[in-house]
Image (cartoon, grey):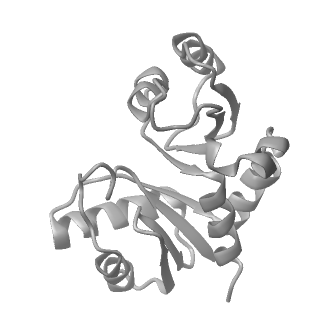
Amino acid sequence: MKHVALLRAVNVGGRGSLKMADLRAVAEGLGFGGVHTLLQSGNLLFDSKGKKAPALEGALKAALKHHHGIETDFLVRSATELNAIIAANPFPAEAKSAPSHLLVMFLQDRVAAKDVQALQQASKGPEIIRHQGRELYIVYPDGIGRSKLTGSLIEKKLSTRATGRNWNTVTRLAALAVTP
């Protein structure tokens, strides 16, 4: 089964530097097949049989720490889950007109609706947030870079780890996940 692993806080803002060749080697060392990476921001695609996301996340995290001394979280979704995330997008117009301003925030855990409401209340900018399953869909009309709706704020309000990818990256990952 094809999976996508998204690393949290790697090669962002000069922190957690990791070569994608090293990331691929970690996955191959775990016996995963069909290993590919996309961009330099920690997007890993691989085949794995029988293991569920939490076990894959734990194995990748432990192997990365052991081999490279980097401790970060992995958020794993199957290709099927990734396609469902795309299909559930509540912002189809923004996906077409401004895909770099549409972010999918992948959450490690399911979160309560009351916590998402608290996040929306804490967000004072023009961002629009929708919640579905273990993902948030966020439109950043003024761009992500200067927004006060940061990953840190999201994690604090939702009490879970998270990592975001813009719509362009999400759809590219999905396309690669179906490639044999």
**Residue for point 58% across, 36% down:** 110
Q: Quadrant of residue 58?
A: bottom left
- Where residue 165 appears, as percent x and y from the top left, is 55, 51
- Where residue 150 appears, as percent x and y from the top left, is 44, 30
Quarter that holds the C terminus: bottom right
Q: Is residue 179 above or below residue 100?
A: below
Q: Is 111 left or right of 179, judged from the image as shown?
A: left
**Residue for point 34% across, 50% down:** 9
- Where residue 4 appears, as percent x and y from the top left, is 55, 67
- Which is nearer the eye, 91 or 118? 91
How many marks the image carries: the answer is 0
Q: Is 155 left or right of 69, judged from the image as shown?
A: right
- Which is nearer the eye, 54 or 137? 137
Q: Is residue 168 above or below residue 133?
A: below
- Which is nearer the eye, 127 or 30? 127
Q: Is 37 left or right of 174, judged from the image as shown?
A: left
- Where residue 67 appears, as percent x and y from the top left, is 18, 73
Q: Is residue 164 above or below residue 82?
A: above
**Residue for point 43% across, 35% down:** 151
- Which is nearer the eye, 129 or 134? 129
Q: Quadrant of residue 52?
A: bottom right
Q: Is residue 123 above or below residue 110?
A: above
Quarter that holds the N terminus: bottom right
